Image (cartoon, grey):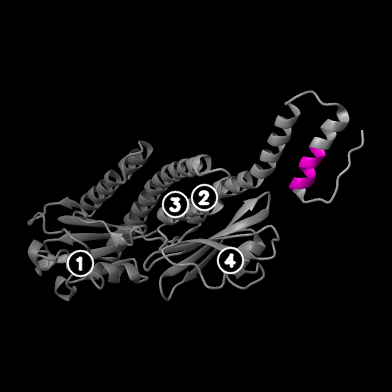
């Protein structure tokens, strides 16, 4: 897969990487037609039309969306990474709404292998690849090993390309959040900043729902502040000692990833830290057929830095306004030392809510 590596080094678009993967499958496995369906976790769907290599007898028939319950979704949901069945045993995969003609019959496919693009050490699935033959073909154990090796390499290539794109998109999202902090009003609106962080995190990780929680000044509990894809819970307060991903992330000061293998869903709680102090939590829930990963946690942590910066900016703004007012007053005309100190102490007393203050020189 040297050419795939070259494409990654050259920062080629993901579509080019997928095409090179399909071409390699066609060449190395001596197939007649290869179709690669990229699974997009951020959209919870397959990209159509698929990437193809080889001769297609009927162009334009592989359009539309992949319906729930089709062969593709069934393969993606199963733990196995390799399927080999005769076309007569395939369930009809409706690839568009204009025809009920099955792919195998339309293209004259006699034998087919279906491979899940997934590495052995990862739960993340990059897509499905169909290796089609217009002749009878028996897949030997050696063939299966070769196919699984190729599929693992392809999954690594796709994951790497996605990581490059993810980093680029994350940087762009951080720049957009910086603009919100700079132009979002004076003082900055913390909820507005948290909402932008949450929406960016959900878009980049493919989460279906998300929430942010924040510690008030008392730090006794977390408050639900913003939501995405859902409403705020009726219970507005969460104690750090409560059981669950949020409490664990707040207590352990590290992200908490919970996987539900029965429903193919996951929950990710990421603490927003400032010098090892937990300021808040970003909580994300994945959709069906999508698993959040440690890379997603890193993305959220990068975005969360800006939420902490915006929060500190908002907290420091009011004292800065008070100091600016005192400085302006002192510049109005020359004051003796006692009068100048009284002006300064008046500002400190009012800002801190003190009953009195005293200065010693």
- Neighbor class of circle 3 (other Cα within 10 Å; few <14, some 14-19, many 20+) is many
Disc 2, SS: helix
State the separation of the CA atoms marked 4 and 3.
20 Å
Q: Does residue 347 show up magenta in the picture?
A: yes
Q: Position of residue 317 (x, y in %)?
A: 64, 42
Tell me the quadrant of the picture where the C terminus can be found: top right
> Is 180 situated left or right of 114 in this image?
right
Q: Are marks 4 and 1 in contact (CB under 8 Å)?
A: no
Disc 1, SS: loop
Q: Quadrant of residue 87?
A: bottom left
Q: Which residue is mark 3?
A: 200
> Is 221 situated left or right of 171 in this image?
right
State the separation of the CA atoms marked 4 and 1.
51 Å
Residue occupying the far front of the picture: 333
**Total numbered badges shown on the rendered structure:** 4
Disc 4, SS: helix
Q: Which residue is mark 2?
A: 193
Q: Which residue is mark 4?
A: 246
Tell me the residue at 26%/56% (across/down): 47
Please state which of the two labelled residues, at mark 1 or mark 3, is closer to the viewer. 3
Q: Does the rendering let one see residue 98?
A: yes
**Labels 4 and 3: the sequence-earlier one:** 3
Tell me the residue at 51%/57% (across/down): 294
Please state which of the two labelled residues, at mark 2 or mark 4, is closer to the viewer. 2
Q: Nearer the viewer, residue 177 or 129?
A: 177
Q: Is 106 drawn above or below residue 179 in the view shown?
A: below
Q: Which residue is mark 1?
A: 138
Q: Magenta region: which residues?
A: 344-351
State the separation of the CA atoms marked 2 and 3.
11 Å
């Amino acid at each position: 897969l040297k050419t795939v590596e070259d494409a990654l080094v050259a920062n080629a678009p993901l579509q080019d990487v997928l095409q090179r993967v399909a071409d390699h499958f066609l060449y190395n496995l001596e197939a007649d037609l290869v179709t690669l369906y990229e699974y997009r976790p951020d959209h919870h769907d397959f990209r159509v039309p698929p990437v193809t290599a080889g001769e297609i007898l009927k162009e334009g028939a592989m359009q539309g969306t992949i319906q729930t319950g089709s062969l593709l979704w069934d393969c993606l949901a199963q733990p196995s990474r390799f399927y080999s069945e005769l076309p007569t045993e395939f369930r009809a995969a409706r690839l568009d709404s204009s025809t009920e003609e099955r792919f195998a019959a339309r293209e004259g496919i006699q034998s087919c292998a279906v491979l899940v693009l997934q590495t052995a050490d990862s739960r993340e699935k990059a897509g499905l690849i169909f290796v089609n033959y217009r002749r009878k073909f028996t897949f030997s154990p050696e063939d299966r090993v070769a196919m699984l090796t190729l599929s693992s390499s392809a999954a690594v290539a796709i994951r790497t390309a996605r990581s490059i794109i993810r980093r680029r998109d994350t940087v762009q999202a951080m720049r957009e959040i910086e603009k919100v902090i700079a132009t979002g009003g004076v003082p900055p609106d913390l909820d507005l900043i948290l909402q932008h962080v949450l929406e960016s995190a959900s878009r980049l990780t493919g989460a279906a729902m998300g929430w942010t929680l924040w510690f008030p000044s008392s730090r006794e509990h977390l408050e639900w502040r913003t939501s995405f894809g859902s409403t705020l819970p009726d219970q507005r307060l969460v104690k750090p000692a409560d059981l669950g991903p949020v409490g664990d992330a707040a207590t352990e000061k590290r992200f908490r990833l919970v996987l539900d293998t029965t429903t193919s869903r996951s929950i990710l709680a990421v603490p927003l830290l400032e010098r090892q102090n937990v300021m808040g939590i970003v909580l994300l829930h994945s959709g069906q057929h999508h698993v959040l990963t440690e890379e997603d946690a890193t993305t959220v942590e990068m975005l969360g830095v800006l939420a902490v910066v915006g929060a500190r900016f908002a907290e420091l703004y009011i004292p800065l306004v008070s100091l600016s007012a005192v400085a302006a007053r002192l510049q109005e005309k020359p004051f003796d030392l006692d009068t100048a100190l009284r002006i300064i102490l008046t500002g400190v007393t009012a800002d801190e809510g003190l009953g009195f203050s005293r200065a010693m020189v």
